[in-house]
Amino acid sequence: MNKEEILKEIIEQRKSIFPKDYTDKEISQEILDEILNSATFAPNHKHTKPWRFKVFRGSEKAKLALEMQAIYKAAQPGHLFLEKKYNDIGFKINKADAVVSIIVNFSGMVPEWEEIAAVSMAVQNMYLTCTANGIGCYWSSPKIVDHLKESLTIEENQKCLGLFYMGSLE
Ligand SMILES: Cc1cc2nc3c(=O)[nH]c(=O)nc-3n(C[C@H](O)[C@H](O)[C@H](O)COP(=O)(O)O)c2cc1C
């Protein structure tokens, strides 16, 4: 296949794949590095590089799951609390091999929407690199990420736009 055909195939094959479909196989560090590196090639106005990604694996990921569950529980009045939703938050993070927090850093040099757009393009690069490497992934943007404090250090000029879940498919 020539370059155009390969690119077309990867773009067309890309899709969101959820943790229930991930296997237990670890993503190699080499592929994970490649996925994160691809993000940094996204276009970004005035080269502000507005993406801040933090990778969670192993015990840090387990802690993230507990914090997300605690936030959900604290935010629900008792009668709205759903055990299934609570368990599902933990299941998804624990089933993924790696979870990346998607944070935008607002530099003040360009409009905020441009920096969100640049981060989104960086995430698309990660999606495409996952697809090319047979890794399942998806962008999740639950409201509760606004309350993550222990797992993430969010500065005044930053915002968490969600979590990027990844896991092997074979
Ligand atoms: C900014 C953004 C936020 C998203 N947030 C969620 C989410 O919170 N939950 C979810 O299930 N999917 C989320 N998605 C994934 C979309 O549901 C998915 O991209 C859409 O259904 C199209 O499917 P595809 O990615 O397979 O083409 C998000 C996608 C984007 C681009």
Image (cartoon, grey):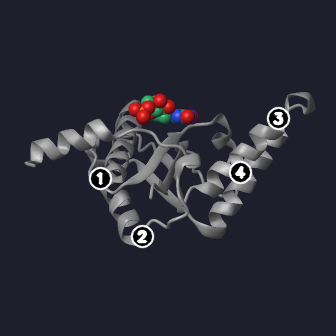
Comes first in the chain, label 2 or label 1: 2
Comes first in the chain, label 2 or label 3: 2
Q: Mark 2: is the Cβ under 8 angstroms from ligand 1?
A: no
Residue placed under numbered mark 2 in the picture: 28
Q: Secondary structure at mark 3?
A: loop
Picture residue at 32% right of the left edge, 47% below the top = 128
Instruction: Give whichever of 86, 150 is nearer the camera.
Output: 86
Residue placed under numbered mark 1 in the picture: 132
Q: CA distance from mark 2 to mark 4?
A: 23 Å
Q: CA distance from mark 1 to mark 4?
A: 28 Å
Amino acid carrying mark 3 in the image: Leu
Q: Mark 4: is the Cβ under 8 angstroms from ligand 1?
A: no
Amino acid carrying mark 4 in the image: Gly
Q: Secondary structure at mark 4?
A: helix
Comes first in the chain, label 3 or label 1: 3
Furthest toward the left, the residue is 2
Q: CA distance from mark 2 to mark 3?
A: 35 Å
Residue placed under numbered mark 4 in the picture: 90
Which numbered circle lies on residue 82? 3
Instruction: Give coordinates of residue 109: x percent, y percent.
Output: 35, 40
* Above-or-below relation of 80 to 17: above
Q: CA distance from mark 2 to mark 1?
A: 14 Å
Instruction: Give coordinates of residue 18: x percent, y percent.
Output: 53, 43
Q: Secondary structure at mark 1?
A: helix
10 Å crowding of disc 4: few (<14), some (14-19), many (20+): some
Q: Is residue 82 left or right of residue 43?
A: right
